[in-house]
Amino acid sequence: MLYAHVPFCEVLCPYCSFNRFPHREDKATAYFASLREEMRMVADLGYRFSSMYIGGGTPTVMVDELVKTIRLARELFDIEEVSTETNPNHLTDAVLGPLEGEVQRLSVGVQSLDDDLLRQMRRYDKYGSAAQILRGLEAARGRLPTFNVDMIFNLPSLTEKVLQRDLETLIASGADQVTYYPLMVSPAVERPLEKALGRVDYAREERQYRLISRTLAPRYRPTSAWAFSRSDATMIDEYIVDHDEYVGIGSGSFSYLGGEIYANTFSLRHYADAIDRGHPSVDARMRLHRRDQLRYRLMMDLFGLRLDKRAFEEKNGMSVERALPVEVLFLKAAGAFARDDAEAIELTETGRYLLVVMMREFFIGVNGIRDLARASLPEAERALFADEPACGRPMRMPQPVLAGD
């Protein structure tokens, strides 16, 4: 899998720890050019990809530059499918038209269809009211092979009544795919998020998850622990489920290769300088211990709802029960397995929720690394977040291994 990161947003949401910057056309134009140059460098190293995922930020913030980038990827690699993210205000002919024939899966970050919640998340003024968003969803339906709607549950002021109404509205909208993420709060955004939205109550999370799962069940089938699809579409936001290894390009992206995690610089200036010099933009890496590699694969396979035991043993040289006896026993005792035989493990609804919790904590950990990287930005770039509390104090975290060490 090739992952490309576009770190520009028109609005910076208070709960988000992804690498993102306020959008400026000149900065974004130069960035896309660097992104394409980095793609050529990756091709020269001999990497080949069948799928491409473009995240952000808001990748469609400059749709012509995005399309040029996708077309280059298809020239350089055997790309069969492309997924990209967008926001509700980009569900227009001006954006959707150029994406037709280029993108196989479009994922729109709606997050909520409640106007009060949209205001709390600072999304109402820029991305529109619930009624405006629904009109955009209707306009986008059928334009691309798969249309996914991203939502968030367990927001502090999200009641079950509002959640039920949102679910019924989404079903009526005819979206091909719905992804419901649990709220994931990293340490650096905890205080600003609490100020904007209120304190997170994890005691409500399982109840809301079961409501989502059971309400969508008649028309949507689970395609991961938090994604639900009407059709046989299998491309989901969590591309790390279906791909053992992936290469990330762009500022703030991650790669996972040979049991090592690589992080690209979060600084736009440092990123551009590295690419101009013909150097990779990686500035930190971490080697996972063998046991953690096995745990990672167990979590990803089960998050994708099925662990193929024979494939696991062939890849890792031992059965999953021998490799991770305590983890397997815990999950089995917790009632996570609907199927556990010689061929595969599949999950119950309880098991799917346990994987949601695990992935939530996994991504909170990843967000902690992102927070550290953002807190270490050069002063000129930190100044771009002067009114953004989430970029505040540096965090006390272990230092990563520098790529040059």
Image (tube, rainbow, N blue to C red):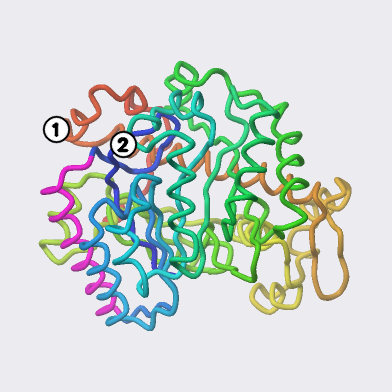
**Which residue shows up at 76% across the image and 34% down it?**
207
**Which residue shows up at 43% across the image and 40% down it?**
132
Residue 374 is marked as 2
Marks 1 and 2: CB-CB under 8 Å?
Answer: no
State which tag comes first along the sequence, 1 or 2. Answer: 2
Spatial CA distance of label 1 from label 2 is 12 Å
Compare residues 293 and 206 and report the one nearer the observer: 206
**Which residue shows up at 66% across the image and 25% down it?**
159
Task: Using a 10 Å C-alpha cutoff, classify the residue at mark 1 as few (fewer than 14 neighbours), some (14 to 19) or many (20 or more).
Answer: few
Start and end of the magenta stretch? 23-45
Residue 33 in sight from this viewpoint: yes
Task: Using a 10 Å C-alpha cutoff, classify the residue at mark 2 as few (fewer than 14 neighbours), some (14 to 19) or many (20 or more).
Answer: many
In reply to whether residue 42 is colored magenta, the answer given is yes
Percent of width and height locating residue 327: 76, 52
- Which part of the image, by quadrant, shows the C terminus? bottom left
Most frequent secondary structure within the magenta stretch: helix
Compare residues 79 and 104 and report the one nearer the observer: 104
Question: Above or below — where is 349 with respect to 82?
Answer: above
In reply to whether residue 289 is colored magenta, the answer given is no
Quarter residue 246 falls in: bottom left
Amino acid tagged 1: Ala
SS under mark 1: helix
Percent of width and height locating residue 228: 65, 56
**Residue 384 shown left or right of residue 245 in the figure:** left
Q: Which residue is mark 1?
A: 380
Amino acid tagged 2: Arg
